[in-house]
């Protein structure tokens, strides 16, 4: 296959063709030779249902997976084309952040490990949105990713199916995208909604705004559309092969629900078995239990979907009936087993007049997993405490992971080449071998080469930022990066205050030995998330103020990159020195950005939250910069005794930094963003107390660690810390995660 692909590419004429034309021709030349690996009829396969798949740019990754990346570069170079031009092709932004990127890493690893794991999602017409800044404010533009063509998506018209809602029907047309491994090509199947303007809205946008009833109902339609298309397809395939005795269905099919968005798949499975094939309700529920697994990604209540009963009844009356029967079955079971009223209320499917998707999944699925060890413990101790007491055997942990193919081999070819030279290439197939690099931890020659690679990746990052933003990063600076979804619990606002404190110290001459430093942000705010948009504007105001200050602008720089995506991440994780992972302890389920930075030799400056805890275990606390209140202290502060205003009264630096929100230092154009942020810290709101995310508790320790890093960066010891992180990162490969899913949950 490889030889034929290379011949196809050699035959392409490049003269006078645009980048987009060449991209489509080369991609099509590859696709002509690719054969998808179908699920084996006599073996079990797993299906990963996710509302997001943040796959990023496929061109380079697929060439890497096929083992022809360098050959294609050479062929194009002979034709006068630099393969770097294909960076103009924009990412398919079919995800918002960690949830979708994790899904993409998982299906990549499954193909790499020769496992029959197939993704199922939605083929959105537009991605999340393209972000731009107007005077520092986030503005959203449609992300028309298909304008470049979609040569990697194969339309399967003959496999289209009809999805029924109470008010009409929609066609779900599958498109298969290749997920390439050494021995198999798995399909990521994305369904496109067709059948008129109303139908097409279902797959038009990822996460339509849900601040209106219309928006909420559209999101519900999306979730059922995905669930029904995937489940209907699996049941039809089973019946074609095995008939209508569904007893063996779980022996051939495992379905993983990536968070609560696809949980309606459980109800749809039961609906079809009982309504179409006359399976008893009790048996259908048992079979669903053996088939479905549920991954919880958050304890934040706003992400634990609860659908008003009226919405389900109005759009999906048969699903309404199934969920009500499930709730009644659960109630009878709990009564029979003597479950107390408080515990039952905690676990009920119908909760506060709505259907709880999380409780539905926890009740039916045979496995419920968290995504980092601390997160899984919080699920058992807090969020699903009653369910864990009732069915402890369901609960397992699978710490998240990232694919080293994209996040090391592709984005950091220089570091990968160093590893090849020192321990051979076996690590590329068996990431556990990366740990063999630990024997060079005190080898000055290897460390010097590692430092040179980090400097080169930083130069490449600076070139990319200049190309995208027109901003030149400070030369030879320490790069601190906080790139992730914009949310209050991730505490980008705390980083902003820390920068202001450092800025003031620089202006006052308190930091004579301060090394040039860049704080790099990348994040999108949900369009209707008022505070998150305010934080973006605040950080951009800080960036502007520092850039205009001749006294400090040669030492300190803040850059908020626009339209942060997978391709931007590939440059940032390879070039950054410091990974800022500063969420309030107990709220970041895992994180995966922290793993990408670690694998590329950045130290973590962060709290003991999510996978940071396991990163510190793998690489050593002494090789990272940990600060802040831990979960137990946060819990105690929540129960009482936390007064952020008392902290502000005592801490002049924090008071001045926070005060810039309202003292006229910065301007939010009269939109009220900054006053609302100030009030959220000092007064609170109807739904939370002041400083809900304990920024002011952790801020002094955060500043201390940032300055400690500045003092140590560039030293031999700091390089050793960076190297220790890179060579200790094998555990965080999604290969390990997928093996654990395959063994603990799917029984592949």
Image: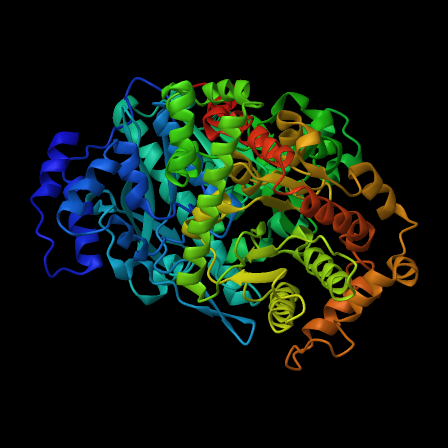
Q: Is residue 668 left or right of residue 596?
A: right
603 displayed left or right of 123: right
- Looking at this view, is 384 or 196 the one in front? 384
Quarter of the image with the C terminus is: top left
Q: Position of residue 272 (x, y in %)?
A: 40, 37
Tell me if residue 629 can be seen. yes
User: Quadrant location of residue 540?
Assistant: bottom right
Residue 118 % position (x, y): 36, 33
Point out the image quarter for the N terminus.
top left
* Left or right, residue 64 beside residue 351: left
- Residue occupying the point 69% across, 54% down: 514
In the rendered image of this protein, does residue 716 appear above or below residue 474?
above
Q: Which sits in the foreground, 412 or 458?
A: 458
x and y, in percent, of residue 237 in the image: 29, 31
In this view, the residue in front, 169 or 396, is 396
Please determine whether, in this image, residue 469 is positioned above or below residue 481.
Answer: below
Give 698 or 527, whichever is nearer the viewer. 698
How many numbered discs, if any? 0
Residue 562 vertical position relative to residue 598 in the rendered view, above or below: below
For the point 14% across and 36% down, the residue is 5
Image coloring type: rainbow
Q: Quadrant of residue 546?
A: bottom right
The answer, for residue 186, to whether it is visible in the render is no
- Residue 81 spot, x, y in % from top left: 19, 52
């Amino acid at each position: 296959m490889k030889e034929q692909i290379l011949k196809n590419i050699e035959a392409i004429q490049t003269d006078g063709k645009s980048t987009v034309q060449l991209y489509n021709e080369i991609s099509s030349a590859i696709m002509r030779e690719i054969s998808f690996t179908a699920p084996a009829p006599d073996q079990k396969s797993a299906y990963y249902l996710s509302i997001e798949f943040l796959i990023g740019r496929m061109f380079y990754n697929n060439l890497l997976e096929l083992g022809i990346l360098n050959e294609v570069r050479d062929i194009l170079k002979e034709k006068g084309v630099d393969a770097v031009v294909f960076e103009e092709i924009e990412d398919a932004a079919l995800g918002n952040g960690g949830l979708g990127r994790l899904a993409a890493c998982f299906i990549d690893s499954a193909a790499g490990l020769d496992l029959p794991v197939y993704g199922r999602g939605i083929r959105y017409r537009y991605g999340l949105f393209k972000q731009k800044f107007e005077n520092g404010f986030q503005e959203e533009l449609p992300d028309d990713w298909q304008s470049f063509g979609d040569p990697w998506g194969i339309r399967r018209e003959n496999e289209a199916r009809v999805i029924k809602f109470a008010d009409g029907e929609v066609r779900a047309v599958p498109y298969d995208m290749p997920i390439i491994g050494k021995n198999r090509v798995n399909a990521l199947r994305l369904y496109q909604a067709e059948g008129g303007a109303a139908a097409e809205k279902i797959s038009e946008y990822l996460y339509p705004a849900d601040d209106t009833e219309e928006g909420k109902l559209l999101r519900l339609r999306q979730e059922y559309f995905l669930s029904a298309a995937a489940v209907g397809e699996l049941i039809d395939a089973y019946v074609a092969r095995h008939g209508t005795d569904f007893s063996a269905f779980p022996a051939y099919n495992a379905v993983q629900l990536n968070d609560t968005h696809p949980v309606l798949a459980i109800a749809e499975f039961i609906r079809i078995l009982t309504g179409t094939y006359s399976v008893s309700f009790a048996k259908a529920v048992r079979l669903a239990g053996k088939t479905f697994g549920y991954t919880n990604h958050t304890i934040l209540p706003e992400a634990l979907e609860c659908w008003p009963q009226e919405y389900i009844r109005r759009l999906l009356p048969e699903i309404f009936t199934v969920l009500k029967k499930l709730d009644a079955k659960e109630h009878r079971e709990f009564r029979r087993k003597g479950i107390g009223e408080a515990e039952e209320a905690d676990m009920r499917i119908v909760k506060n007049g709505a259907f709880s998707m999380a409780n539905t999944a926890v009740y039916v699925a045979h496995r419920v997993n968290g995504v980092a060890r601390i997160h899984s413990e919080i699920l058992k101790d807090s969020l699903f405490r009653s369910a864990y007491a009732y069915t402890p055997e369901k609960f397992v942990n699978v710490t998240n992971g990232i694919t080293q193919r994209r996040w090391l081999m592709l984005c950091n070819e220089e570091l990968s080449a160093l590893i090849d030279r020192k321990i051979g290439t076996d690590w590329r197939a068996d990431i556990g071998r990366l740990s063999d690099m630990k024997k060079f931890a005190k080898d000055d020659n290897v460390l010097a080469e590692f430092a040179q690679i980090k400097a080169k990746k930083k130069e490449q990052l600076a070139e990319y930022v200049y190309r995208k933003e027109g901003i030149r990063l400070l030369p030879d600076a320490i790069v601190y990066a906080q790139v992730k979804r914009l949310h209050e619990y991730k505490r980008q606002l705390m980083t902003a205050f820390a920068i202001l404190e450092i800025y003031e110290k620089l202006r006052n001459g308190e930091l004579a030995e301060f090394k040039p430093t860049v704080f790099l942000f990348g994040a999108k705010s949900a369009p209707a998330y008022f505070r998150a948009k305010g934080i973006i504007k605040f950080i951009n105001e800080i960036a502007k103020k520092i850039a205009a200050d001749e006294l400090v602008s040669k030492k300190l720089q803040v850059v908020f990159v626009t339209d942060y995506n997978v391709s931007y991440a590939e440059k940032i994780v390879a070039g950054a020195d410091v990974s800022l992972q500063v969420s309030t302890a107990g709220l970041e389920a895992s994180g995966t950005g922290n793993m990408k930075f670690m694998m590329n030799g950045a130290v973590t400056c962060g709290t003991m939250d999510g996978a940071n805890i396991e990163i510190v275990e793998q690489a050593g606390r002494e090789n990272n910069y940990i600060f802040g209140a831990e979960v137990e202290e946060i819990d105690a502060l929540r129960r009482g005794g936390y007064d952020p205003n008392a902290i502000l009264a005592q801490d002049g630096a924090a008071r001045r930094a926070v005060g810039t929100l309202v003292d006229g230092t910065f301007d939010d154009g009269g939109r009220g963003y900054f006053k609302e942020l100030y009030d959220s810290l000092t007064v609170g709101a109807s739904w939370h107390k002041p400083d809900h995310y304990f920024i002011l508790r952790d801020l002094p320790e955060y500043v201390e660690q940032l300055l400690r890093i500045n003092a140590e960066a560039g030293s031999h010891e700091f390089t050793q810390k960076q190297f220790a992180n890179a060579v200790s990162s094998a555990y965080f490969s999604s290969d390990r995660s997928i093996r654990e899913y395959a063994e603990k949950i799917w029984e592949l």
